Image: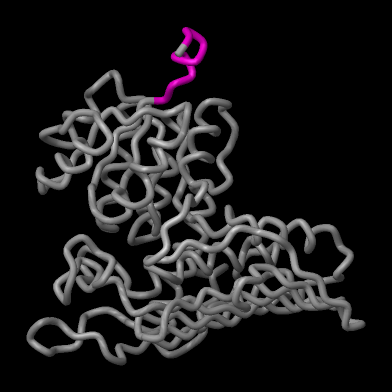
Amino acid sequence: MNEDETAKMIKAGIIGCGSIARFRHAPEYAANGNARIAGFFDPVTERARELADLYGGRVYGSAEELLADGAVDAVSVCAHNAAHCGYTVDALAAGKHVLCEKPMAVTADEARRMIRARDRAGKILMVGHNQRLLQANKIAKELIDGGTLGRVLTVTGAFGHAGPEGWSRDGGAETWFFQKGKAGFGVTGDLGIHKFDLARYLAGGEAATVYADFRTADKTYGDGSRIGVEDNAFVILGFDNGVAAQIHLSWTHYGGEDNATRVCLTGGVVKLFGEPNRPLVVVKRDGETRSYDAAGIQTNGRQTASGVIDEFIDSVLTGRKPAVTGEDGLAALEIAEACARSAAEKRPIELKKVRG
């Protein structure tokens, strides 16, 4: 490696060594030619040690030790949801660029605090919403924005799988995903946050009204009692540009994964990940149909490169805004928060009034 290549190397620390770090962040940093892993921290030291043995780097004794290391340029925050805000604010204050996993935080107020910390630090803050980075979704966005398919009318989608207990490093019924104090939400914060961001991206507007129904249909703790968060959510969004969206989120989709999205426009329909081996299909109003070649979608059982780390590293190197900003993370979180309130109060929520 020559001197110029060394100068471009971004040294990253990873806080939290659960499944998202193990299957996405660590291998994707290792595969990026402009990144090197400086080290890992996890409250369970053995988890950090396992990843350090695989990818190199130090095992830090605390997050504070990692953030105090001048060799660390950037930080991935991969801890449980309730820890995102604290670690992110501290990392930005320490002069590090931050890639924070989704959801950005557990409250919109926390997300705003993170954005203020970014602005004070003058560093990059990216949120790990990977769906808008998928090749098929990017092509779909280009087609929609190109105008040949007319105006967007509706977005419908689903995101379902058998639940996080099989994915989580903790595993089983005691996973932190089922603990409201650590997760903040159930399926809405885990899967819904992705679909909310994608719906904003494809609809080209901001959610104005939210109506949601939450159910805990099947998931239980080890003692047989129902978990304290929702395992299913049914969401209707009204956007400020007149587009409507309907989304079903499920941790009880026991027949594999469903991550389909459909955009109806005045000139046709865009189908995303709804047909086997055809990630993107466009059916025009006159019946003309075209399939587009695109990479498949990541699933818990099929890990492929997400593009998140590459996007983060490039934004750090160039100083440009990342594809998913703190404001994007906040907007998705405001929808999730409004969903929870709507479900509790059994009424639609007007986001404009909530935002003040």
Looking at this view, name the residue that lies furthest to the front.
Answer: 277
Give percent across and percent down for residue 133.
58, 53
| Left or right: 120 in relation to 143 | left
- In this rendering, is residue 13 above or below 285? above
Evaluate whether residue 62 shows in this view: yes
Percent position of residue 198, x then y: 58, 64
Above or below residue 160? Residue 345 is below
Query: Foreground residue, 352 or 89?
Result: 89
Q: How many discs appear?
A: 0
The residue most toward the right is: 286
Name the quadrant containing residue 336: bottom left
The reply to whether residue 344 is in sight is no
Which residue is painted at 49% across and 15% down in the image?
A: 5
Question: Would residue 97 be found to the left or right of residue 87 on screen?
Answer: right
Q: Quadrant of residue 87?
A: top left
Q: Residue at x 17, y 63 (%)?
A: 170
Q: At which x and y percent is residue 50?
A: 17, 43
**On the picture, is 179 further left or further right than 271?**
left
Q: Position of residue 246 (x, y in %)?
A: 58, 82
Q: Nearer the viewer, residue 219 or 273?
A: 273
The verdict on residue 102 being magenta is no
Q: How is the image coloured?
A: one colour
Which residue is at the far top?
A: 3
Any magenta on residue 6? Answer: yes
Image-based side of 76 in relation to 15, left or right: right
Quadrant of the snapshot with the N terminus: top left
Q: Is residue 326 above or below residue 291?
A: above
Q: Please give the name of the residue rendered at 36% of the width and 75% of the height, measured from the top-left corner.
A: 187
In the image, the segment drawn in magenta is 2-10
Residue at 54% over, 32% down: 314
